[in-house]
Amino acid sequence: MEDKRIVEINGLKVEVDLRTAKRVDSFKVGDAVKILIKKYSDNYESHFGMIVGFDEFKALPTIVVAYLAPSSWEQPLNFAYINAKTEGIEICAQDPKDIGIQKSDLMGAFDREMNKKEQELREITRKRKYFEDMFGRYFQSERANVS
């Protein structure tokens, strides 16, 4: 039996030692994966992710992957939907030796985003109160004219 095989990946020929090669043919919910996303032109980003679901649509079964994008601190957790028509996204099994992301960094990103949204809510609340105080009389007089 031959232990080595030549595999072509996107035009690049690679010799693979079949004794140490690992092939993953199936995924299950909870599997750690890497997701490769095409951003623009020929630029790609790789992210850590986890399979969170399989949507068994008759026409287009779909794998749902939650992935971490710490470069986008406002939205560190994103979702990708991968099916036969998906372009620009690939997944593979995550190598356990990959250096991951620190939980504390992501929790900090979530905290910052929550604080930002809380500040936005306080600002909207102040504007609403200002509107009620300043324009409330206008709308009361409008109702009086309609009666």
Image (spheres, rainbow, N blue to C red):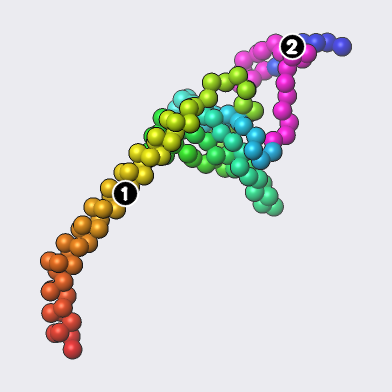
Q: Nearer the viewer, residue 108 or 67?
A: 108
Mark 2, residue position: 17
**Res. 143 image quadrant:** bottom left
Could you tell whether 76 is left or right of 125 in the image?
right
Stretch in magenta: 8-27
**Res. 137 image quadrant:** bottom left
The quarter of the image holding the N terminus is: top right
Could you tell whether 45 is left or right of 74 in the image?
right
Q: Which amino acid does label 2 sit on?
A: Asp
The residue located at (39%, 34%) in the rendering is: 108
Q: Is mark 2 on a helix, strand or loop?
A: strand
Could you tell whether 106 is left or right of 55 in the image?
left
**Marks 2 and 1 in Cβ contact (< 8 Å):** no
The residue located at (25%, 58%) in the rendering is: 125
Count numbered badges in the picture. Answer: 2
Q: How crowded is mark 1: few (under 14 residues within 10 Å), some or many (20 or more)?
A: few
